[in-house]
Every structure is written in structure tokens, then in C-alpha cells.
Amino acid sequence: NRRILLSSRPVGAPTSEDFQLVSGPVPQPEAGQVLLRTLFLSLDPYMRGRMSDGPSYAAPVALGEVMVGGTVSRVEASHNPRFAMGDLVLGYTGWQDYAVSDGQGLTKLDAADPHPSHALGVLGMTGFTAYMGLLDIGKPVAGETVVVAAASGAVGSVVGQIARIKGCTVVGIAGGAEKCRYVVDELGFDHCVDHHSSDFAAQLAAACPKGIDVYFENVGGAVFDAVLPLLNTRARVPVCGLIAHYNDTAKNATTPGGPDRRATLMGTLLRKRIRMQGFIIFDDYAPRFGEFHTAMSTWVKEGRIAAREDIVQGLENAPSAFMGLLQGKNFGKLVIQLADA
Ligand code: NDP
């Protein structure tokens, strides 16, 4: 049984030294327990927060413990009447080949589902985040302009496609020409702007001639600086993530652009009566997962929502894939495949 442990807390960007791959015997399930073989492991930006012990909405991973993460696993042995060998389950068993569980927190998946890894993405945590953040906080109205950052990624790609379904004009922001092409050609956004371009702010303004009514914030940093002046009166800003800042340290977290940035932000919110609201998906919306799942399954079946995955083979490649996620190297929902489904 191979497991990846947190061996040190990163300062700034994580490095391979912060992770340790260890091997040991496969655990044996006891009465009431099941043995789970991990098939797919979800890698998500929030894991950077769990590597640090600063203030957070969730406890950090302890040093020497297995890195946490959502998983799709197969039941390989069962001493629990709720589960049979061969069942597929969604769980939170982390960066390891095998886990034992008493069944708490496991959700059975349809074993005949041809695409079980979607339970970690479009039909799971990231799709749910896109759905609730956009519809409950963003409240898009047909004809409005919706802008979403990290637009080719797990959350952003779904936000933009739902906004299209709701009749909005949708502008994505993504890193690089290839991601931008995909966002327009495959996902059906109206425009996509490359945030690496030297004239990014001007390109974004040109793509939003009527201003921005909903900005779905995944990123922060320079992207938000370009968005702020374009926000319309009564704009809504669901604050979902700030990935541009996850590796900030007291040393590198400088704020370019002059001393009045807080005043500019507060003044804009005040004058334009803008609503910004953060949310933590399962803390705030867990009771609405069923509603989301029904709507999203239908859209995916009808081909109205596409979900690209970036599947990396092998547990041993999880640390480098995770470090890449924080630098925009993933293209779609990042998932590690540990064994054949
Ligand atoms: P993605 O699949 O979108 O992958 C992350 C992407 O972020 C990268 O591919 C990169 O895309 C972009 N990115 C990274 N660094 C920067 C930067 N400095 N400036 C601009 N873009 C950057 O990840 P997810 O869809 O899983 O997550 C998106 C956001 O949603 C994250 O901030 C995450 O923390 C948040 N989240 C919040 C939840 C909540 O409950 N509030 C739940 C789930 C996710 P590109 O190459 O296009 O720049």
C-alpha cells in the first residue's frame, strides 16, 4: 500500500520535499469495515490550504499524515452489510492506494457508470461549486454579461456553460491561447481572454462592451484588478477562490498599484452597490446537493455541459501534478488514476 504523506509545511509554492511516498502492507478490514482500492483521486486547489497551519475553515493535515482528498474507490473486501465486493464508492480517503472505512461518509456510485471519475468533478464537488456559486450568489439574468476566471478549469468551465444555458453573454479568462480556444470552440463561451497577454486589461474591457454584471471569482490577483473597473452597478461577485494568492507569504504578498487599493475597492462597492459574497461549498450548501445532481446529470446527458478531465496516471505523480495545478499546468479537472476502473 503506497501512501503520500505531508512531510513539511511549504513556505510559498510547495516543492517535492513537502511530500513523502511511503509503502507498507495493505490494511485489513475488521468487523463492520470495508477495504477500498482507490481508482481515482481528485486534486484540488484547496489542498494547498490544508498543507499550511494558518487560519482556515478546515483543520490542516498533520505532518506525517496522509494528504487528504476526494476519491472514487472499489470495495475489495466487505465486513459491512451496506457494501458488497465490487461496489464503487465516493469517499474522502486521500492520497493512497488502499484505505479501510467503517462506511461513514461513503456514497455508493452506480457501478455501471461508464465515467465514475465525474463524481469528483462535474457531477461532484467542483460542479456543485459552480452551480451554487453562480445561481445562488451570482443570480445571472438572461442578457447579462458573466465573466469567469480559470475558465477552462473544473469550476470555471461549468460556471460559463451554466451561464450560457441561462441566456447570458459569457466571457472566460484563461491562461494561454490553447485554453482560450477550447473555452470558445468547445465550451461555447462568447469570448475568452488570455490573462498572460501584456494588454490583458484592455482585451477584457473590449470583450465586455456592456460592462460586467456577474464576476465569478476563482483567482484574485491581477485578474481581479482588471475586472474591478468593469463591474456594473448592482453587479454580483461570488468569491469562490483566490488561487493566485495560495502561495503568498508575508514576504511575497506585496500589493502593486499604489496605496489606495482598499479605498478603490470599497469605493467601487459603495458607489455601484456591488454584492461580493464568499462561500464554502459543502458548509453552505450540502442540503442542496440532490437538486444540483439532478440538474447537472440531465445537462451532461443532453450534451449541454461538457467536462474535460486532465487524468494523470500513477499515485507517484500526484505531487508534481498538484504543484502544476497551482501554476496553470492542468487543462480541465485534474484527477489521478491509481488503478483500472
Ligand atoms: P482549476 O481546474 O481551475 O485549476 C486551477 C487553475 O487556476 C489553473 O489551471 C490556472 O488556469 C488558474 N490559475 C492558477 N494560478 C493562477 C494565477 N496566478 N492567476 C490566474 N489564474 C491562475 O481548479 P478548480 O476549478 O478546482 O478551482 C478553481 C477555484 O475554485 C480555486 O480558486 C479553488 O480554490 C476554488 N474552489 C472553491 C470552492 C469553495 O467551496 N469555495 C470549492 C472548489 C473550488 P489558467 O491556466 O487558465 O490560468
Image (tube, grey):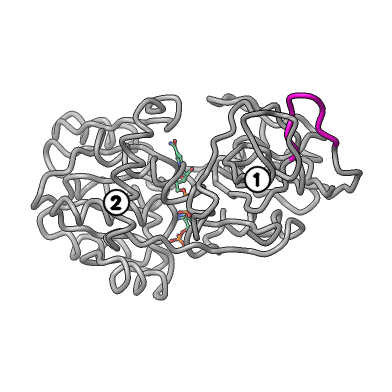
Left or right side of 147 for 10? right
| Amino acid under disc 2 | Thr
Indicate the position of residue 47 as horizontal and vertical percent values.
61, 41
Residue at 43% over, 65% down? 175
Q: Residue at x 54, y 35 (%)?
A: 107
- The crowd level at tag 1 (other Cα within 10 Å; few <14, some 14-19, many 20+) is some
Around disc 2, counting alpha carbons within 10 Å, would you say few (fewer than 14), some (14 to 19), or many (20 or more)? few
In the image, residue 211 sits, relative to residue 56, either above or below, namely below
Q: Which residues are magenta?
A: 28-35
Look at the magenta stretch and give its main secondary structure: loop
Q: Quadrant of the C terminus?
A: bottom right
Q: Which mark is residue 12?
A: 1
Which element is circle 2 on?
helix
- Image location (x, y in percent) of residue 169: 16, 58
Q: Is residue 219 magenta?
A: no
Q: Is mark 2 within 8 Å of ligand 1?
A: no
Frontmost residue, 37 versus 217: 37
Q: Is residue 208 left or right of residue 78?
A: left
What amino acid is at disc 1? Gly
Which mark sits nearer the N-terminus, 1 or 2?
Answer: 1
The residue where tag 2 is placed is 298
Depth check: 8 or 118 in front? 118
Q: Do the CB atoms of the residues marked 1 and 2 lie less than 8 Å apart?
A: no
Distance of label 1 from label 2 (alpha carbons): 41 Å
